[in-house]
Image (spheres, rainbow, N blue to C red):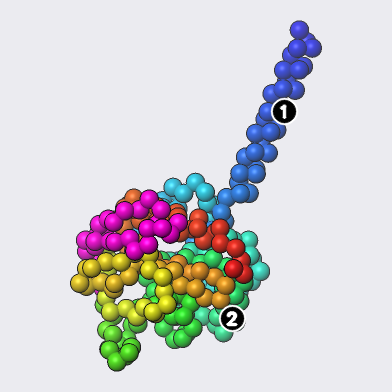
Amino acid sequence: MKKNAHYYKLYVCFFIFIGGVHFSFAQQQKIRVLIVSGGHGFKHEPFYDVFDSIPSITYDTLVQPQANMLIASPEVNKYNVLVFYDLVDSISPAQQEAYIRLLKKGTNMVFLHHSLVSYQNWPEFIKILGGQYHTHPVVVHGDTLNANYEHDVTIPVKVENRKHPVMRGIPDFDIVDEVYGNVEILPQVKPLLSTTHPKSMRYLAWINHYGNSDVIYIQLGHGPSGYSNPNFRRLIQQAIEWSAKQPKNH
C-alpha cells in the first residue's frame, strides 16, 4: 500500500511539473504588447478591457513622455507590438531617430484614434502613419484642409479589403464614435475600412508601409461606445495578432 502511495505521489508531481512547464511555455508564447497613452483623457477601465479580453496577448502600459524614453532604449526590444493611444507633440531628435530605426528593423506598430494628431512639428510622422489630423489649416494638392471632429456620431463602416487577415470575419457595421473630417491621408495607404459619413474622412483604417514595417492606423475608438462594439474589439485583436506575425525586415 505504501509503495502504491509512493507511485501515486510521483504521478501527481509529474503532472504538476508538466502542467507548470506548459503554463510557462504558453505565457512565453503570448504576444508582448506595450500600450502607450498620454496627452488625451479617456475612460481607462473600458479601454483596457478591450485588451484584457484578448487571450493571445500580455501587455504593459506606459504614459508619455516616459514611453518615448523607453522606445529610445534597448528595453523596447522585449515587445512584439507597440500600440499607440497617445496625443503628444514633444519628441527629441534622438527619440525620432529611435522610431525610424525601429521601423527600419521591422518593429510592429498600431496607432489608434487621436494618435493621428500627434507630432505636428515632425514632418516624418505623417510618412510613418500615412496620414495626419492637422491642427492648423494646410493646403494639400491645391485644397485647404481644415480638420474637424464631432462626438457621438453613428458611423456606417464598410470593409474595404475582406481578404486581409486583419479584417477576417468582420462584416460591414455601424458604430457610435467620433468622426474626424478634412484629414490628410497619403495616397499610398492600403485601406481596410471606409465610411460614407459626410462629416468623416473617407478611410477609417489602413496599412502604411514605412521602412520595413507595415504600420496600422485605426481611427475608431474614442470612448466606451466604440470600445464595446464587438467589431471594434475584433479589429483590435486581429490587428495586433497580424502585426506580431509579420517578419522583421520583410
Which label is found at residue 198?
Answer: none
N-terminal of the pair, mark 2 or mark 1, is: 1
Q: Please check the rendered image and state whether residue 17 is part of the magenta-colored stretch, yes or no.
A: no
Tell me if residue 7 comes above or below residue 132 in the rendering. above
- Identified at 56% across, 54% down, the residue is 31
Is label 2 in a helix, a strand or a loop? Answer: helix
Query: Is 189 positioned to the left or the right of 146 in the image?
Result: right
Q: Are marks 2 and 1 in contact (CB under 8 Å)?
A: no
Q: Position of residue 91 (x, y in %)?
A: 51, 80
State the CA–CA distance, disc 2 to disc 1: 50 Å
- Identified at 56% across, 76% down, the residue is 211
Residue 17 appears in which quarter of the rendering? top right
Q: Position of residue 161 (x, y in %)?
A: 37, 62
Which image quadrant: the N terminus? top right
Q: Which residues are magenta?
A: 149-176
Instruction: Examine the rendering and report whether any part of residue 34 can be seen.
Output: no
Query: Is 21 positioned to the left or the right of 60 in the image?
Result: right
Image mark count: 2
Q: Position of residue 207 (x, y in %)?
A: 44, 69
Which image quadrant: the C terminus? bottom right
Farthest residue in the right direction?
A: 3
- The residue where tag 1 is placed is 14
Is label 1 in a helix, a strand or a loop? Answer: helix
Residue type (three-letter) at the residue carrying disc 2: Glu
Tell me if residue 101 comes above or below residue 222 in the rendering. below
- The residue where tag 2 is placed is 97
Mark 1 Cα shell of 10 Å, populated few (<14), some (14-19), many (≥20)? few
Query: Is 75 positioned to the left or the right of 123 in the image?
Result: right
Mark 2 Cα shell of 10 Å, populated few (<14), some (14-19), many (≥20)? few
Tell me if residue 48 comes above or below residue 219 in the rendering. above
- Identified at 41% across, 83% down, the residue is 120
Residue type (three-letter) at the residue carrying disc 1: Phe
